Image (spheres, rainbow, N blue to C red):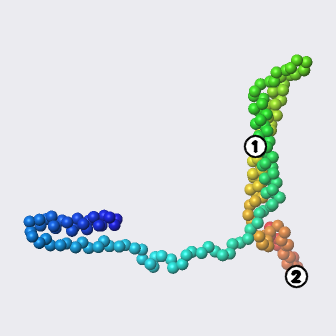
Amino acid sequence: MKTLTSLLGAALLLAPSLAHADDSAPTPVIAAPAPVYSVPSWTQPAYAPVAPSYVAPTKARSVGLLIGGIAVAGLGAASLVGGAVLLDESSQGPAPCSSGELCFPGLETGIEKSEGTFFAINGGLMMAGGVAMAIAGGWQVPVGPRTSGSLWSAPAVAVGPGKAMLNWSF
C-alpha cells in the first residue's frame, strides 16, 4: 500500500511537468499524504483476558475400572496379534511329514486356523471392552459431598397427630 501511494505521488509530481514542457516555469504540484487508518483505542481491551482462577476439582470415576480396562485392552491386543500369527501359519499349508512320524496334515492346519480365528476375534472383543472400561473408569467426576438425591441419603420422617409421612428421594 505504501509503494502504491508513493508511485501515485511521483506520477502526480511528474504529470504537470510533462504537460507544461513548453512553458519555462512549471507549477509544482504537491500530493497530499495518504490517510492512515487505525483501530480506535476504545475498541481494544484495556487488559488481557484472564482465565478463571477457580476450577472445580475432579477425579476419575473409578481408578480400578480404568486400570482394569487398560490391562484388558493390552491382553486383547496380544491375543489379536497371536491369532493373526496363527492364521498366517495355517494359511501356508501343512508341514511335510518326516519319515517315521504319524502326522495328520489336514487336521493340524484346521486346528491352527480355528485357534487363530478364535484368538483374533477374542482379542478384538477384549480390546473393545477394555477401551470402554478405561473410558468409563477415567471419566472425570466432581469431588465433594453428595447432594440430595444421592443413593445413600436418609429418608425424611414427619410424624403428626394421626398421621406419619416418609419422604425418600433417590
- Callout 2 amino acid: Pro
At horizontal 37% and vertical 72% (from top left) the residue drawn is: 37
- Expressed as whole percent of the image width and height from the top left, the position of residue 164 reads 87, 76
For disc 1, the neighbor class at 10 Å (few under 14, some 14 to 19, many from 20) is: some
Task: Name the residue tied to disc 1.
Answer: 124
In the rendered structure, which disc, 1 or 2, sits on the residue that comes first in sequence? 1
Quadrant housing residue 136: bottom right
> Residue reaching furthest bottom?
161
Element class at badge 2: loop
Residue 141 is tagged as none
Q: Secondary structure at mark 1?
A: helix
Query: How packed is label 2: few (under 14 Cα within 10 Å), some, or many (20 or more)?
Result: few
Measured Cα–Cα span from mark 1 to mark 2: 65 Å
The single residue placed furthest to the front in the displayed view is 24
* Residue 170 picture location, percent across and down: 80, 67
Q: Residue furthest top?
A: 99
> 90 or 60: which is nearer to us?
90
Q: Residue at x 77, y 25 (%)?
A: 93
Residue 121 at least partly seen: no
Q: Give the side of residue 16 with respect to residue 137, left or right.
A: left
Of the residues tagged 1 and 2, which is closer to the observer?
Answer: 1
Tell me: residue 112, above or below residue 161.
Answer: above
* Residue contact at pointers 1 and 2, CB within 8 angstroms: no
- Against 95, residue 148 (above or below) is below
The quadrant in which residue 140 appears is bottom right
The total of numbered circles placed on residues is 2
Image quarter hosting the N terminus: bottom left
The residue labelled by disc 2 is: 161
Which quadrant of the figure has residue 49? bottom right
Type of amino acid at the residue the image marks with label 1: Gly
